[in-house]
Amino acid sequence: MAHHEDLRGQVAIVTGASSGVGWQSAVRLAEAGARLCVTARRKSALEQLRVEVLQCGGECLVSEGDVTVEEDVERVVRECVEHYGRVDILVNVAAVQSYGFFEELPWEHITRVFDVNCFGYFRFARAVLPHFRNQGHGHVLNVQSMLAVGAAPLLSAYASSKHATLGWAQALALELAGTGIHVSNVLVPSVSSPMFDHAPTMLNQKPVPVPPTYDVDLVARAVVRLAKRPDRTLVPAFLQGRLILWLNGVAPWVGKALLSHFGVRMQTTHIPLDRPEGNLFTPMAQGVGPRGSVPPTPAWKRFTAALGLAALTGGVVGGAVLGARGLVRAAR
Ligand SMILES: NC(=O)c1ccc[n+]([C@@H]2O[C@H](COP(=O)([O-])OP(=O)(O)OC[C@H]3O[C@@H](n4cnc5c(N)ncnc54)[C@H](OP(=O)(O)O)[C@@H]3O)[C@@H](O)[C@H]2O)c1
């Protein structure tokens, strides 16, 4: 495993940098000394980010583009290499959602979600890999989702695109083993990004993330940790992260019961909203900067929920073990 504890002088391309996780990760990487090339469709938002990065003493090249357009992706990478003479890290972040029941999602929404979330990551990786090969080193750092290893109702296109992207990243890591080129992933929980302020919805109601929601900085800090120590899959959250993964291993029916009964209610509000396309095909003015309108869940609530979930599972698993022992004894 390569260790680049010092990011000073390294060049990172950050996609999806005009809002949310991408924006905050760019700021944190710059603070750690990385030189940036930031991209997304909204150039004015990227220019605002550039000002913030310059203010914290960083370097920032703005190169707007659409991840579904191969020429744009190649141009962004070319501009980065022309400007800095190299590229060391690709942080793949750009993604879109489309809220709705599977049967009601327009087909173009499903294919577009895959084109951005999945093929956008592939396109950027293919554009940087020749440079990484020439240099003999490089790092493809993918911002993934807890939905890459799970699911939620109303997000079938998004969850399946994330499963596909994680599968691709795992295959790529195997192909690149021993080349000096690294592949890492971060499994992101619900975060307070502006995603919910511009995501399309077929439900005519404002969508909200599956609780609990964390601050975007949790993910940005995980991105910096991965940039310094690559080749890992980080799960930065405890409750909507390591605890859920453990729970899905020991008692998968708990998550299934919760999400099948409450998953739709958890993600919808009674606030009417007519936004069938959101930022899917064209960018929206709403949602610039790291944080959006959905606040993070307070830590004490997350702590209480974690205790409740642990007690519930512990009780049920413990009960099941005792019951099974009783049955075995009775059978003897
Ligand atoms: N928010 C959550 O709760 C959550 C949970 C799990 C995982 N994640 C993951 O975290 C990452 C960042 O999401 P976020 O929450 O920060 O969402 P966000 O605020 O909506 O950011 C998405 C970014 O992608 C860009 N983008 C969208 N379509 C694009 C296209 N066709 N070409 C180029 N850029 C495009 C957007 O910029 P423009 O519109 O300017 O192009 C924006 O900068 C995503 O990979 C997401 O799946 C988020």
Image (cartoon, rainbow, N blue to C red):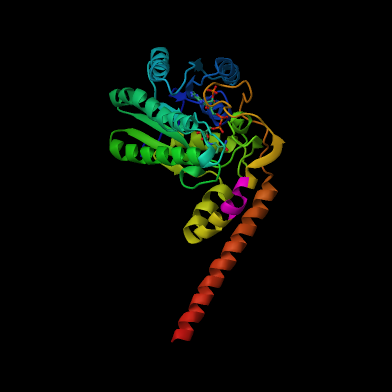
Placement of the N terminus among the 4 image quadrants = top left
On screen, residue 103 above or below 86: below
Residue 209, can we see it? yes
Report x, y in % for residue 224.
50, 33
Q: Is residue 297 left or right of residue 260?
A: right
Q: Is residue 272 left or right of residue 52?
A: right
Residue drawn at x 49%, y 28% as measured from the top left? 94
On screen, residue 93 above or below 160: above
Residue drawn at x 60%, y 48% as measured from the top left? 263
Magenta stretch holds residue 279: no
Magenta residues span 258-264
Q: Is residue 306 left or right of residue 149?
A: right
Instruction: Return the residue found at the far front.
Output: 103
Image quadrant assignment for residue 273: top right
Residue 5, can we see it? no
Residue drawn at x 51%, y 21% as measured from the top left? 40
Report x, y in % for residue 49.
58, 20
Instruction: Return the residue found at the far right.
Output: 271
Residue drawn at x 36%, y 38% as measured from the top left? 168
Report x, y in % for residue 72.
42, 17
Image quadrant assignment for residue 130: top left
On screen, residue 245 above or below 56: below
Magenta-drawn stretch, dominant element (helix, strand or loop) = helix
Q: Nearer the viewer, residue 9 or 27?
A: 27
Magenta stretch holds residue 260: yes
Q: Nearer the viewer, residue 80 or 193?
A: 193
